[in-house]
Image (tube, rainbow, N blue to C red):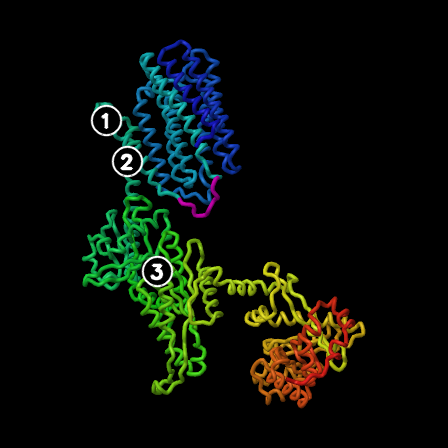
Amino acid sequence: MPDAPTRAVLVLLALLGAGTTAVQLAGLPAAGRVLPAALALGSAAAAAALARRAALLPRPDRRPWRALSAAGALLALGQVLALARPGRDMSSGGIEDLPTLLAVPVAIATAVLLLPPRAERRLGTRVLLDGLVVTVAVALLADVLLADLLAAVHRPAEGLIAAGYPLVGAVLCGIGLVTLAAVPEDRRRAAGWLLCSSVSMAVVALTGAAGRNATDAATAAEWGVVTALAWFAMLGTGLCAAAADRTGATPEADGRRRALPLRGGVLAHGAATAALVVLTGGVVAGRPLTAAEAAAATALLLFASVRTLSWVLDAARLTRRLERTEGWFRALVHSGDAVTVVLDAAGRITSASGPVQAQLGRSEEDLRGLLLVGLLHAEDRDLVVRVAAALRDGAPDGLPATGRLRTDDGTWRDVEVSGAARTGGRRTGDGLVLHLRDVTERRASHRELERLAYTDSLTGLPNRARFMAALDAALARAGRGPRACVLLVDLDGFKAVNDVAGHDAGDRLLCDVADTLRAEARGTDLVARLGGDEFALVVDGGPDEALALAERLVVRLDRTSRHAAPGEPETAGPVLRVSASVGLTEVLPGADASATVREADLALRTVKAQGKNGVRVSGEALVEESARRSRLARDLPGAIARGQLRVVYQPVAGAAEGRVLGVEALVRWDHPELGPVPPEEFIGLAEDDGLIVPLQRWVLATATAEHARLVAGGRDLKLGVNISVRHLQARCLVEDVVRALDASGLPARLLMVEVTESVLMDDDERLLAELRELSALGCVVSLDDFGKGYSSLAYLARLPVRVLKMDRGFVSGIDTDPRGAALVGTVVDLGRTLGMDVVAEGVETRAQLEVLTALGCRFLQGWLIGRPVPAAALPGVVDGFDPGTVRGAEAVAVP
């Protein structure tokens, strides 16, 4: 598109052409001066516009248009010189014709400079022959049209006008045609406009010369009008040529595409035909044929014949190449495993090649002429539409696409469209080329793999992945109205079946439960096994329907039965009771799948905490305890970093010594929103979630550091720190203790490691080795909560334990329960026999203290002795301890 200055000059040329036409046709006396003035103005404006356009192009590409600008300037100079001769017209010769003649080689230089560099030129004999044909044809036409004028030439100047100008026009036309065929594709438009400019110059030469031969003023004026218009057309097309040159807009590339010289051949044949028709018409009309015209016509016929012969040879060569390419294509199609089907615009099969019978179950003859849509399954008849839509943007992004196609025996095959293209480019009315492949076996394998991927192998129920997909679908439907619920079913007592009766019995039980769930659920409900003994249902209905189903499941799954081993009679297995706990939640719009499952799991855990074998619906009141537990589990990992944990210390006093002999470190959690969290609540969470080791490692480091400062003040006190069995099992307790002692400087003899008696349940020699290593370091090993659970006295004798701490359950009621007092006395005697100190925990009343003293228990701990206090207050508690608290007890009779 020409820029604004170029468009302004084009408008000026149009106005000048209209003005000069009006002046000449009106026969005004001033026409002799107006015409050269207008031509000079138009030529100068065009030269300036061409110079400006050339300056905008890259340096190597501006040379043709600078040359054309120089040619325009020479034409303007010639017309300015013509103004110096009053009465001069375009038919007369003079000094003013010299710049015009000089403009011709400059214009030829424009065409030559537009050609690519010599190394990249591919003119060829056909292009040169086309240019030669055009040159001879235009020269012959000029000779025929100007024959009378040429016969009347007597002076050199007249010959220059009459013969030289037409000959120059003919040469320019030939060179312009050669340039059009030889330039690269990105400059072809510019070369086309330049050819139009050359043709316009030839018209100027012919009509200008013909005007001299006019017999009257009116005819001369008419030829003058044509000459002036052709002049302005010559200038305008030259401007359009410069504006169309975009070679600097795209990067150069080797092997840039060039069109076949078809345009040049057509133009050459057209010019030759026109010249020969005019010449033949003149002979028929009785015009004599000169020897020069006969020679030119003979040469033209010879050149045209040679050009036609080259076309024939090209056609034969292209035909052979096409046949060879078609053979390669057919061999390629038939050697592949896909069928190539060609559809017309109506979707009718026009061709099918490749292994048609093997892939599609039909022969090529049967397929030809049929509508592909008619062969597809009713559910897949949009296949062609989908493929066409995928090709709409020129790239088959929607492929491959699959559909079911009916064979000639009535069966169905899964057919995949692996590739597609339009038969005629991107026009919407074109047909399609489809590459089809039989994928029946692959699709069957895929469906089987998909079934396996979404199916539990033991029970045949959908697995967790399928359950989550169904839940996502239910969530999507919830926003549109249909209601759904989720049931989580967990078996109670399943672990006992596995442990006692064996895993085979457990597997049979899971299969029986799966059958029960299938039987109770409706056809629209999804039953899935999530793993282990946990099942889930997506119920198509509201909470009332889901609750009724859950209650039926609880009743059906509450069973007591024998679980015999394979090959044994059913009466031989152990009798075990199994029940089910069910958590229920509604699928709500806007929720996500994980949150929904979490709500159902909270309800399920509420059932478990409240005795199992029941149903609970998710809700704030019912799942408050589970929600609190989940919140604590989420916040516990960061509690240390946020400074929410602290250590307090409870004193342990000696009855005989009358003073504080040690302290027990107790960890406390002050939650910023839930307030103080009891240790029995978060310690269990830490053990379940694998956080107990880092938690106790922090307690060890903190307690030893604070106790070391207390000992540094001259107080000889032992420090007791509770250690979980999980810490022992982690095999890092010794390293953690050593690290804490080294960091704090606390002597190992002052550290008492308290482990619960659950260590007696784990008959692991490695745990025993850990405790022995701690004892070897000098630490005191204490058995905490002794008597609370199961204690193996035989194993107790093997442990390096020096202290037994009686559970507070022994002390509670000791002053009123003779049996409890007898048990405490037995523990005290046992400790004395084994050489162990016995500490009584939970001493809260004076009566309890008096009974313990009477039984010979020397070490006491509880609120009566002292409440837990922070490290800062501990020196005051130790130093201000009243010996009368433990020494003033009166001797009482044991109940």
Secondary structure of the residue carrying numbered label 1: helix
Give me the residue at 71% from left, 74% from top: 865
Instruction: Determine the main secondary structure of the stretch shown in magenta.
Output: loop
Q: Is residue 561 above or below residue 237?
A: below
Secondary structure of the residue carrying numbered label 2: helix
* Image location of residue 576, percent across then percent down: 41, 81
Residue 585 is left or right of residue 295, and the answer is right
Amino acid type shown at disc 1: Gly
Secondary structure of the residue carrying numbered label 3: loop
The circle drawn on residue 281 is 1
- Residue bearing the label numbered 2: 301
Disc 3, disc 2: CB below 8 Å? no
**Image quarter in which the C terminus is found:** bottom right
- Residue bearing the label numbered 3: 540
User: Which mark is in front, 1 or 3?
Assistant: 3
Graded by Cα atoms within 10 Å as few (under 14), some (14 to 19) or many (20 or more), the crowding at tag 3 reads many
* Image location of residue 542, percent across then percent down: 37, 58
Residue farthest to the right?
714
